[in-house]
Amino acid sequence: MISISSNKPVNKTDKAMNTFERLESRVRGYCRSFPTVFTRGEGSVLYDESGERYLDFLSGAGSLNYGHNDPALRQSLLDYVEGNGILHGLDMATEAKREFLETFERIILKPRGMHYKVQFTGPTGTNAVEAALKLARRVTGRTNIVSFTNAFHGVTLGSLAVTGNVHYRHAAGVPLGNATFMPYDGYLGPHVSTIDYLEQCLNDRSSGLEMPAAVIVETVQGEGGLHTAGVAWLKHLQRLCTDQGVLLIVDDIQAGCGRTGTFFSFESAGIRPDFVTLSKSLSGYGLPMSVLLMKPEYDAWEPGEHNGTFRGNNLAFVTATAALRHYWSSNDFQLDIKHKAALLRGRLLSMAGPPAGAGLRGRGLIQGLVCEPASAAAEICRASFERGLIIETSGAESEVVKCLPPLNIPDGELWAGLDLLESAVKEIRGRSRETLVQAVGAEK
Ligand code: PLP
């Protein structure tokens, strides 16, 4: 989540940012948090126009799981462009699309025993969510969708209706309806089973919950504060949906493509959602591409019903195919993600203690420090940027410092980035101690 509080330029770059302030809409976000002009990216490193080097723990909000300009992916792209490959083909059949579909089936779906059809939606994640919601309503004939507290599914009207955050909802300009929010796993504290509550509501015809077409869930709430759904909770949710004839949609746009240690974030729970949305790192190279995976029996579309001019980003198909071949043909990559995730967890735990690390949230290579007070998170991100680390906040109050490094970041760079983060945490901790001491002094 963009830390809105970070409007204040960090230093030096007021002049460099002038053009953007003058000509670009106020809606711009990340360039406020990182006010410098970037020119180059290599792996986990970004360079700005004055030659300064930054470690990237934001990874295009999860769109660059293989870092910037991965050489294997880049070569496939260059070869394709050199050979005058089709760049734009609406949703026509192209060789690049066929290669992607066959590779996805062979490397991802088949080994996991998954049978899904693939819908190429418009290129943004929100469009895949829109398609999932429309299709679920079409298939069931119902309109309501159950979503969860702190969910983030996008900012177009359908996906916004199932997004919790008031900052985004306010911008809709129309009432957002046909959605019911239920408490996510852990929302009511460790001793209350929120899934039992959902079950009770679905079973009680007087609960006031309109029988939903679908439940949409993130296994890790990427924008909503890195809350995680436990394995037992997800299994229970799947059982509940099956029993009630409600479709289960897993939005794996941020947590998927390896971020949690397996290709799909729900693999450890052993569930089989009816629909899965994927986007962000699917193309592997930061190129826009989104898909909706659906169990074949739910493919109820009429031809062209959910269309869009940019459903066939062939460059993205090429790099997506290369990414699957390069990183997912064996188990080595997954093992390496798990190793890095343990390293990350260890370092974050060692930073724990107020104001950062009042707790840790997340899993895999999407983990973060929960700050108390919440405002300390943005301060830590700002202090990190001054040290050459790009890192953002997440959560309803932007209370989490979210670590989202590339999955293939070398251990040394991961360690170096965490050193920068730790130093920033120490600075903010020191400052808040000073404030505390001053406040105590003032009270006397
Ligand atoms: N769903 C999830 C889980 C996301 O994290 C996001 C974006 O952060 C979206 C949907 C929306 O994707 P996009 O910003 O590409 O529309």
Image (tube, grey):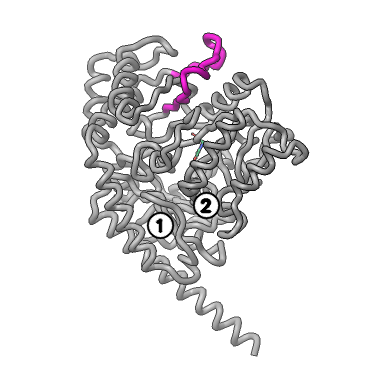
Report the residue at 40% width, 60% height from top: 384
Q: Count the numbered circles shown.
A: 2
As for residue 305 lying within the magenta part, the answer is: yes
Q: Residues within 10 Å of mark 1 (few under 14, many from 20)?
A: many
Residue 57 circle label: none
Callout 1 amino acid: Phe
Magenta residues (range): 289-311
Report the residue at 54% width, 30% height from top: 129
Residue 224 placement (x, y as % from top left): 54, 48
Callout 2 amino acid: Gly
Looking at this view, is 157 or 7 the one in front? 157
As for residue 12 lying within the magenta part, the answer is: no
- In terms of secondary structure, where does tag 2 sit? loop
- In terms of secondary structure, where does tag 1 sit? helix
Q: Main secondary structure of the magenta part?
A: loop
Q: How far is mark 2 from mark 1, CA to CA?
A: 20 Å
Residue 225 circle label: 2
Q: Position of 432 compared to 323: left or right? A: right
Looking at this view, is 131 or 43 the one in front? 131
Q: Position of 221 compared to 192: left or right? A: left
Residue 372 placement (x, y as % from top left): 54, 66
Direction bottom: furthest residue: 444
Report the residue at 50% width, 17% height from top: 297
Mark 2 within 8 Å of ligand 1, using the beta carbon: no
Residue 385 circle label: 1
Can the viewer see residue 36?
yes
Residue 268 placement (x, y as % from top left): 39, 43
Say which quadrant the C terminus sits in. bottom right
Can the viewer see residue 23?
no
Quarter of the rendering containing residue 154: top right
